[in-house]
Amino acid sequence: MKFDLTDLRIFLSAVEGGSLTAAALQNNIVVAAVSARLRKMEVSFGLPLVERTGRGIRPTLAGDILVGHARKVLDDTRKLEVELDAFSEGRGGTIRLLSNTNMLSEHMPQLLGSFLRQNPDIFVTVADKPSMEVVNLLRNGEADIGIVASSADMTGLERWRFVPDRLVLIVPGDWALEGPVAYARILDHPLIALNTTVALSQFLRRLATELGRRANIRIRVENFESLCRIVECGAGLGIVPESAARRYGRDMGFRTLEIADGWAERELYVCVRNQQQLPLYAQKLLLHFQTYAEEAKNAAFREAAIVKI
Amino acid sequence: MKFDLTDLRIFLSAVEGGSLTAAALQNNIVVAAVSARLRKMEVSFGLPLVERTGRGIRPTLAGDILVGHARKVLDDTRKLEVELDAFSEGRGGTIRLLSNTNMLSEHMPQLLGSFLRQNPDIFVTVADKPSMEVVNLLRNGEADIGIVASSADMTGLERWRFVPDRLVLIVPGDWALEGPVAYARILDHPLIALNTTVALSQFLRRLATELGRRANIRIRVENFESLCRIVECGAGLGIVPESAARRYGRDMGFRTLEIADGWAERELYVCVRNQQQLPLYAQKLLLHFQTYAEEAKNAAFREAAIVKI
DNA sequence: TTAAGCTTTCACAATTGGTGAAGGCTGTTT
DNA sequence: AAACAGCCTTCACCAATTGTGAAAGCTTAA
């Protein structure tokens, strides 16, 4: 391992404080330890990170590059702690939100971002679970709000249409495939897929099993961006939400095809056990979701109109 | 410390592999060590993170929340390594980019994101330096492209207008201040500012010194979002780029006022030593910047048009 | 030149983290 | 029903990492 969260923390204090001494004080360790950690990082990167001026230190160019990343990483770890702590304390004002797949990385950032800005005293914890489990957890009261695919059995839960979520097939630019393609035919080709822990992956595997087949997965990747990039290189086909295909399709050289099967035409639902019994702040988020869904619909219309012009 | 990068890595392998054994194999340690690490995390969070089923493990709800964050943190550390390694090797295809302030977090994400997607074999390293140093580093050939404020002395460098970057004053909603305000008058009030390492902070402090005054900084924060939020709470005034004020102003309760002084009317420039001598891939990025600047200008026009309607 | 303020080095101590074997639990197989 | 295979936990022990405190060297300011 090249470095450590403590390394980053100490490095940052040093740069911000302008001296190793400052970093040592701030982190309750001795200057020698700071010096050692810094040196260790420098040799492992093979780069000087700070310039020793005899009156303190200043980051070198490399150090400045590190600063940006270190801030980000530490910031994320802080959020991690905050969110898990909030969850563990069951603190009033913590909403437990479940989504069906990472695909919601399409909508959630803006959606939650603006909500959290407007309500800085509310915490939201997010987790990715298969739709099936989401509805169970909602029923047991272990979560407040869930986003699930229309395929799930939502009996006994209150629900609202959220956004459409059609799955599409993406193929390398020079691949000879056309028109709506059936999953059975897709399975003839090598595929690029997401991690097995992601709901979408599990869903597709089950589907293949039902056809008595097995998908020929070439690689599994972390997110849709990587997936698209690998498809672009011609390594295989990929199945992604239309929003992702549109998003990355502009810059990448793959083509987007319809999937013939009915399940590709998904719809996402917002789902709760009982809106009335929900804490007020959770109802507030629910409302936020609903207005967002409205806006998304309008935006789609507007886009269509512009294209017409 | 509650956890460690190694903890996260191992936790993720365990969840993805579905067992501690799998995680142990993948990380070249013994199962007992994995177990110990997991337990340590669980007690420090005060939460069970996985459910032991006797036939492996499955993440609990809390565990699933952690998964998302762990992925993000580890992903960031990977990017950190990649970027610093690229920088240290001076690898062909690495562009060294400098910006004058973190304000570029306004433009850079989309800008670099789309560029890197279109050119997956090019690396870009980014660092934040005061404009003055940026121009020096460019002159010495220690960096390829810089973004600097118009205030810097760019003689001997080639430059293009990038985007306007007016500084504005933000005040809590119930504060009684109006119209264009001079910096001398701003200094009468408590201020919220960024870290001292950020160029903008240094610039403002120097400005105060020239007036023979000292800013009364209440708190220093990491980024403009936190700054805006604290101003919103009524803790003091803040000086931020107009883009940030617009971005957060929609959701927050502060007002935006003009700053009377001339330096508030900044303009950002893209700056290089010699376009011809630049490596081809760096010229490509330069071009990308130029088209982006064009688009931004057009978008501004379009927005103005819509408002008129 | 002195003094103050930094960083580095080094031997040593403390803490942390890993090892491997033994044991217990669960679900499967015969 | 009993043996089995796979998995997690515990524990005593050992190795590696990390922090400590003192001494020394360097740079700037008075």
Image: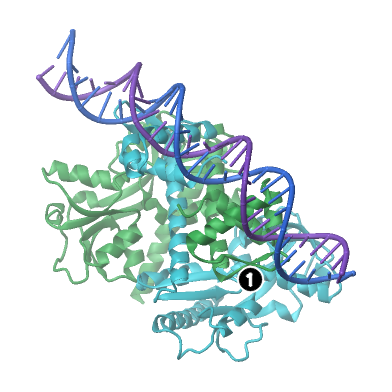
Chain colours: A green, B cyan, C purple, D blue
Residue nearer the viewer, C7 or A110: C7
Residue at image position (43%, 46%) is B68
Mark 1 Cα-neighbour bin, 10 Å: few <14, some 14–19, many ≥20: many
Left or right placement of residue B245 versus residue A157 in this view: right
Left or right placement of residue B237 versus residue A271 in this view: right
Q: Which residue is mark 1?
A: B242
Q: Could you tell me if residue B19 is visible in this image?
A: no
Residue B103 at x, y = what percent? 60, 69
Quadrant the N terminus of chain B occupies:
top right
Q: State which quadrant residue A49 falls in.
A: bottom right
Residue nearer the viewer, A225 or A180: A225
Residue nearer the viewer, D15 or A137: D15
Chain for numbered disc 1:
B
Residue nearer the viewer, A249 or A68: A68
Left or right placement of residue D29 versus residue A276 in this view: right
Left or right placement of residue A71 versus residue B240 in this view: left
Residue at image position (35%, 61%) is A225
Q: Could you tell me if residue B3 is visible in this image?
A: yes
Residue B202 at x, y = what percent? 71, 70
Residue A205 at x, y = what percent? 21, 45
Which secondary structure, mark 1? helix
Residue at image position (27%, 71%) is A253
Q: Does residue B110 lie above or below A17 as drawn?
A: below
